[in-house]
Amino acid sequence: MESNRHAAFEIQHEPNERSTIQLRGDWLLRSERPTARQMLQELMASDTHTNWAFDCCDLGAWDSALMMTLARVYQAGRDAGHSIDTSGLPDAVQELLELSQAVPEAAVEEPVKSNAGLNEKVGVWTLDTLAGISRYTHFMGQLILDVGSVLRGRTPFRFREFWILIQQAGVQALPIVALLSFLTGLIIAFIGIIQLQKFAADIYVADLVGLVMTRELAAVMTGVIMAGRTGAAYAAQIGSMRVNEEVDALKTFGIEPVAFLALPRVLALVLMMPLLTILSNVISIAGGMVVSVSISSLTFSTYINETIRAVALTDVFVGVFKSLFFGVIIAFAGCYRGLHCGKDAAAVGRATTSAVVTAITWIVIVDAVFAVIFHILGI
């Protein structure tokens, strides 16, 4: 008979198709003990015994060493279809075994096999597209409901963080927007004035820069910059919170993640985009003026007067109006991808990339749609 201090086990195969595992001695990490493989080999020796039970009458001290062994035996028995009775184990061990089985396995999407037929691939793509549209619609609806809840005072709004987001999306974005706007106006003016000089029409370079920037490029370019800068940051920030299970913690405390994380970011970017677009208009026109005065006979006053004559307030309002929608698109894409990214480090990178690509794609599409609408309306 084994000493009470040495870990050991014995399998009793009973005639009623029941195998009892008798545990003896001290099952401690610092001492030698039988392995789960040894226990399973003896248990599997009789294929007819489908019911397993435990007997701990002679069990001494134990720690996680016992738990690791029993957890492997328990899982292997369950996978093999055996019925396992844990009532003979100490209460603490039973609770830990139940807890170890309570966490479900992570769901892994099965990739489409390379040898799948065309119909199968089209079907999978269609189902994924419909599921994506459903998630987008749910997110948008939740965002709209949260806006109404904030306006009615039912959901607290964190103004302190909101002003920080305003600063990040506005003031801190001014240098990059100003630099690229100046260079864009400079390039358009340089290319335009070389062609216009052939017809002695240097003066119309002011019309070209002013109209192109105010109606189209200022809003689009600012949107692309903010998609790569702020939209990506939103996706990375929220995605990292999801990986660290901070989003799950918010849900546990009864806090809606969309209202807590997405809504302030969407409002901040929507408010800042028109201001950044107006700044882009002014800086780009100044860049065009620098080139025009430098390489032609135009003067500063002539260029400014021609710009005022060519560019109407309607043109400015068109660009500013579109920038509001671009701000919604950028913030929406960033927050959505962040909240729906996976829970590993690689998923954050994929979410960030997807947010930028999605935002830029929809900015171009929406700009084209507005161009057709404004043409039909004669604006």
Image (cartoon, rainbow, N blue to C red):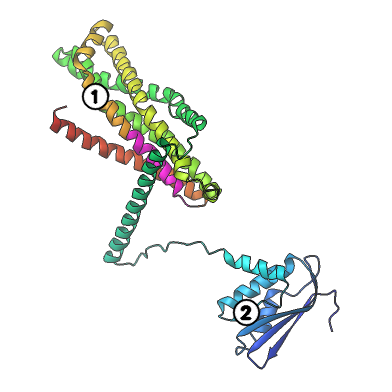
> In terms of secondary structure, where does tag 2 sit?
strand
Q: 58 left or right of 202? A: right
The residue under the point 29% across, 26% down is 320
Report the front residue among 6 and 271: 271
Judge depth for marks 2 and 1 and give the one in front.
2
Whether residue 150 appears in magenta in the rendering, the answer is no
Q: Is residue 8 above or below residue 114?
A: below
| Residue 211 against residue 243 in the figure, above or below | above
What residue type is disc 1 on?
Answer: Val
User: Residue 360 sits in which quadrant?
Assistant: top left
Quarter assignment of residue 166: top left
Residue name at image x 35 percent, y 33 percent: 327
Residue 339 part of the magenta segment = yes
Which region is colored magenta? 326-342
Around disc 1, counting alpha carbons within 10 Å, would you say few (fewer than 14), some (14 to 19), or many (20 or more)?
some
Q: Main secondary structure of the magenta part?
A: helix
Q: Position of residue 142 (x, y in %)?
A: 39, 46
User: Does residue 70 sit above or below 221 in this rendering?
Assistant: below
Q: Find numbered disc 1 in the image and state the secondary structure of the residue it sits on.
A: helix
Task: Look at 42% across and 31% down and name the residue there.
Answer: 268
Does label 2 or label 1 sit earlier along the sequence? 2
Along the line of sight, which residue is nearer the eye, 372 or 142? 142
Q: Which residue is mark 2?
A: 84
Q: CA distance from mark 2 to mark 1?
A: 75 Å
Identify which residue, 285 or 341, lies in the foreground: 341
Residue contact at pointers 2 and 1, CB within 8 angstroms: no
Q: Position of residue 106 (x, y in %)?
A: 51, 61
Which residue matches tag 1?
212
Residue found 57% across the figure and 63% down from its top: 103
